[in-house]
Image (tube, rainbow, N blue to C red):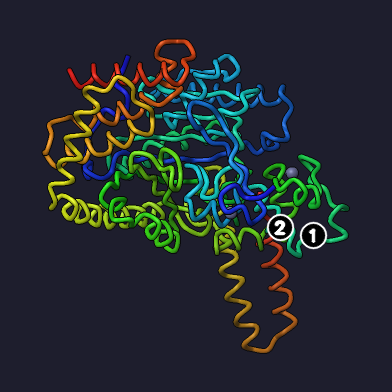
Amino acid sequence: MLCQHCQKNEANMHMKRIINGSATEVHLCSDCARSLGYGDSFSGFGLGFSDLFRDLLGKGERTLSGNALRCSLCGKSFDDIVESGRVGCAECYSTFYDKLLPTLRKIHGKTTHQGKVPSAFENSHKTQQSKVEKLKADLKKAVEKEDFETAAKLRDEINYIVNGGAAK
Amino acid sequence: MSAKWYLGTGVQNDVVISTSIHLVRNLSDFPFPHMLSLQDKLKVNTIIKNATDSLDNYNFNYLEMKTLSQYEVVSLAERHLVSPEFASSRDGRALLITEDEAVSVMLNEEDHIRFQVMYAAFSLDEAYRTANEIDNCLSDKLNFAFDDRIGYLTQDPTIIGTGMKASVVLHLPGLAAAMQIPKLISTVQKLGLTLRGSYGEGAAAKGDMFQLSNSITLGISEKAAIENLKSITLQIAAQERSAREEILKSNVTEDKIFRAYGTLKYARLLDTDEFMDLMSLVRLGAVKGIIKMDTAKIEGMMINMQPATISLSVDRPLDRNGRDALRAKRVREMLEM
Ligand SMILES: [Zn+2]
Ligand SMILES: [Zn+2]
């Protein structure tokens, strides 16, 4: 389907809009959607963002092994997420963390949460952050001393925590 | 019946019409709504509804979307109380809403919980304080999906992190007349914000009403996002004021304002687009003291004269001509008051 504004690009955003008293679907390419200022209160891109997410995910992130791993809560594989352009549940973010991270970086420019932490997570969040800080300092020292064996161990430990090994 | 939120007034009200905070939250034990059966959606609704019972300061009405008529649902979207997406498919969705419509909670839209807090005028701190208080209470009762690394987990990856969108609605007749809006849209994008028409987008933006919100939610705290929005809002408001001075130097604008007022006062048919354009001029005249009119009344009219909302007021579907006639009648009555 072509973008209904420029009639040139493929329409990859399909958004519901209220026009003259009824809900209507609008089909636009992402360039036009952006320049026309489409979006809604909840998301900069607007709902129906899924095509764009799919496009972002599809670029190089899809792997042959993508089907082997499935999310334990919703059952989606990474290919399912790419196919539908939608993450199935919160657990998907842990299961496919490495594969989703580049897309989150493309959208937000950053990948580390700043700001509010729900009270249930406050303690684990703080201890974990300070633990990672300490490990990073140790790692730096080990590298300076050219103690690469210790450095490798520390790096593994940091990756383990950062990638959710010690989370929850 | 308590007074609606938009009847309030406040600072920067000549340019800033309203403020809202939107927060997105999900329950960690359930997949996102598009993966849920109808039965599970209803279960999620009940869990969240029960959690809101602990919010003593807020009296929510609970509405199952499928029990509402098409007009009622579209009217909720016209009044920005639910999203167009929410209005377009009703099964398994529910709304919690306070009497003054300042707080509304969409259940099972694209995420389990999407709620908003609205305030009149420029009130970002107050709106965030209220939203945060509600979030804290809910968070005591519910297990929210959260990850130490990437924050609150959402179906839509554009809002992951804080899950927060802060917005202000701006009235920009001066900048619109100076053809500055397209430039402004691209400028604010570079500053991590989005500007869009509040009633219709792009060339179809009605009434010179625009919504400005933060576009980034990961790697920026709620406070930083709100401070950024605040400072850009104040800059745009200042630009708008000088643009207004510029167009008001000529008596052509003054003439347009009085003509708009005259048309609103005597017209027998008013379609939505014309109504919005005229109201924009009248609002400009009112805040500049050119004509005497209460701005809260103007905001109320803009909200209540939208197509489905006006049909809803007579409880039956009206055709276009019927709507335009009723709108003109209501506007005449309002201006007599
Ligand atoms: Zn296009
Ligand atoms: Zn999943």
Q: Secondary structure at mark 2?
A: helix
Instruction: Give the mark nearer the N terminus: 1 vs 2.
Output: 2
Q: Which residue is mark 1?
A: A62
Q: Nearer the viewer, residue A112 or A134?
A: A112
Q: Is residue B186 visible?
A: yes
Specify whether B90 is left or right of B213: right
Q: Of all residues shown, which one is farthest toward the top?
A: B315
Residue at left offset 60%, top offset 62%: A105
Tags 1 and 2 touching, CB below 8 Å: yes
Chain letter belonging to callout 2 = A
Chain letter belonging to callout 1 = A
Q: Quadrant of the C terminus of chain B?
A: top left
Specify whether B245 is left or right of B172: left
Res B150 → quadrant: bottom right
Residue at left offset 66%, top offset 47%: A50
Q: Nearer the viewer, residue B301 or B118?
A: B301
Mark 1 to mark 2 CA distance (whole Å): 7 Å
Q: Return the x and y of residue B238 as percentages of the image width and height.
A: 22, 55
Q: Quadrant of the N terminus of chain B?
A: top left
Q: Which residue is mark 2?
A: A57
Q: Which mark is residue A53?
A: none
Q: Is residue A48 visible?
A: no
Q: Return the x and y of residue B161 as percentages of the image width and height.
A: 54, 52
